[in-house]
Image (cartoon, rainbow, N blue to C red):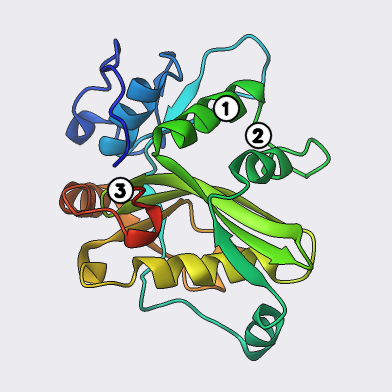
């Protein structure tokens, strides 16, 4: 089981009282494990402002992107690509987040503080990576935070075609157990690319209601270290 860290010194308030028109709901706080877990349990996630020295931004999107576990679109070409890939879990977390944080990537947002914070969450058993390997080389991956039946996806990368998509397919498979109907695969925002894979939008109230149920569930077997 994950190790519960000391509680956060910060309060994120009641999500029902957040601005109904603004995804940005908080500024400040810290990235301690207890703070991050408190945020995810209330439907928030952090992102740097993009300006060095500025405090952290916290988002709870008005329209949340989620991937229904029975709604994933898997193309024939993706199925073919997956034959050449080996999927592993939590064998190279630091390398996955480092690849996701590569400053050469367009619209990169993962800074040194974010990397350190999520590596610590991984050490405590809350953050996980799903990895695609080819000829014993890491060629794609994703990482996120697992709290009970919630998997909050943070970022993904690929070095060969479809490697990150293969990781997403594998993740969905890990979540599709006897609790699948109440598990939540959160991707933060719906983009055209994610929509092509089956991601849909639900409103904040619906997400928060699903979140409450999901966090009461046991972890998927793949992420339960025992």
Q: Residue furthest bottom?
A: 76
Q: Report x, y in % for residue 49.
A: 59, 23
Q: Which residue is mark 3?
A: 226
**Disc 3 crowd, CA 10 A, few/some/many (<14, 14-19, 20+):** few
Q: CA distance from mark 3 to mark 2?
A: 33 Å
Q: What residue would you read off at disc 1? A: 114
* Quarter assignment of residue 38: top left
**Residue 177, labelled with which disc?**
none
Q: SS of the residue at dot 3? A: loop
Residue name at image x 47 percent, y 65 percent: 171
Residue 203 percent across, percent down from the top left: 30, 53
Q: CA distance from mark 1 to mark 2?
A: 9 Å
Give the class, few, some or many, for how many residues have Cα within 10 Å of label 2's Cα (few <14, many ≥20).
Answer: some
Q: Residue at x 16, y 53 (%)?
A: 213
Q: Position of residue 185 (x, y in %)?
A: 38, 58
Residue beneath the point at 69% across and 42% down = 95
Near mark 1 (Cα within 10 A), the count class, few <14, some 14-19 or many ≥20, is some
């Amino acid at each position: 089981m994950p190790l519960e860290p000391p509680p956060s010194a910060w309060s994120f308030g009641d999500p029902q009282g957040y601005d109904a028109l603004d995804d940005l709901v908080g500024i400040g706080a810290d990235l301690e494990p207890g703070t991050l877990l408190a945020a995810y349990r209330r439907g928030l996630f952090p992102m740097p402002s993009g300006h060095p020295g500025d405090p952290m931004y916290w988002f709870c999107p008005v329209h949340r992107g989620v991937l229904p576990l029975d709604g994933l679109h898997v193309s024939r070409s993706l199925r073919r690509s997956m034959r050449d890939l080996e999927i592993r879990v939590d064998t190279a977390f630091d390398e996955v987040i480092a690849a996701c944080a590569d400053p050469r990537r367009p619209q990169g947002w993962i800074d040194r503080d974010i990397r350190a914070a999520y590596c610590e969450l991984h050490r405590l058993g809350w953050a996980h990576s799903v990895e695609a390997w080819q000829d014993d080389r890491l060629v794609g991956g994703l990482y996120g935070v697992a709290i009970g039946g919630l998997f909050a996806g943070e970022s993904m990368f690929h070095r060969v075609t479809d490697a990150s998509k293969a990781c997403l397919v594998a993740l969905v498979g890990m979540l599709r157990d006897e609790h699948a109907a109440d598990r939540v695969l959160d991707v933060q925002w719906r983009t055209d690319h994610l929509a092509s894979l089956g991601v849909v939008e639900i409103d904040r109230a619906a997400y928060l209601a699903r979140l409450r149920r999901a966090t009461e569930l046991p972890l998927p077997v793949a992420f339960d270290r025992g």
